[in-house]
Amino acid sequence: MKCPKCSAQLKEIKVKIQDADSSVTSYQCGGCGYFDFEGKSMEKAISEIRAREAPLKIKQKIIKLSHDRLGMYINRDVARSLNLKGGEEVYVSVPDKNRLIVNLVHH
């Protein structure tokens, strides 16, 4: 494979990416310093990194509302990152006794 900038021969090098298990194939030019990454190996590494990302967890208190109802405040940063507004509808599901899942309704 030839360098698109200087037409020198590119070297195929395996590169270790932080937080990814598999290495990524890089094509590097010794003449001008040009480099590029092979698409499939890069996508695999990105998928591995995303799989390791921990979901946001915030400890919240359940509050008592009127008429024996319960509620929960949504943290301002969470609301902003999800672009939530007051009065929006959500779907609430309870898959087991330890989890409450809230899915946003997108209109």
Image (tube, rainbow, N blue to C red):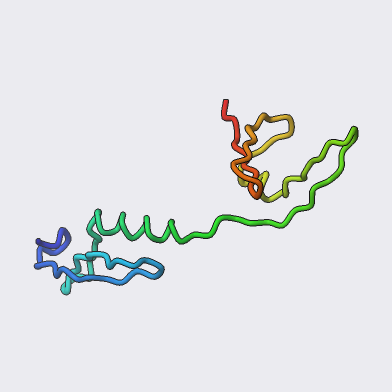
Where in the figure is residue 85, as x and y percent of width and height?
Answer: 70, 35
Q: Residue furthest bottom?
A: 30
Q: Is residue 14 above or below residue 107?
A: below
**How many marks are shown on the rendered structure?**
0
Task: Give me the residue at 29% from left, 66% from top.
Answer: 22
Tell me the quarter of the image containing the C terminus.
top right
Where in the figure is residue 99, as x and y percent of width and height?
Answer: 63, 47
Comparing 96 with 75, the one in front is 96
Task: Place residue 5 in its image quadrant.
Answer: bottom left
Q: Is residue 79 left or right of residue 38?
A: right
Q: Residue furthest top?
A: 107
Tell me the quarter of the image containing the N terminus.
bottom left
Task: Give me the residue at 66% from left, 38% from top.
Answer: 84
Task: Give me the residue at 34% from left, 67% from top.
Answer: 21
Where in the figure is residue 64, as x and y percent of width and height?
Answer: 86, 43
Task: Give me the residue at 24% from left, 61% from top.
Answer: 36
Q: Residue furthest right?
A: 66
Q: Is residue 50 above or below residue 104?
A: below
Where in the figure is residue 86, as x and y percent of width and height?
Answer: 74, 33
Task: Place residue 40 in its image quadrant.
Answer: bottom left
Q: Is residue 96 left or right of residue 63?
A: left
Q: Residue furthest front?
A: 97
Comparing 22 with 12, the one in front is 22
Comparing 61 with 11, the one in front is 61
Task: Place residue 6 in its image quadrant.
Answer: bottom left
Q: Is residue 6 left or right of residue 85?
A: left
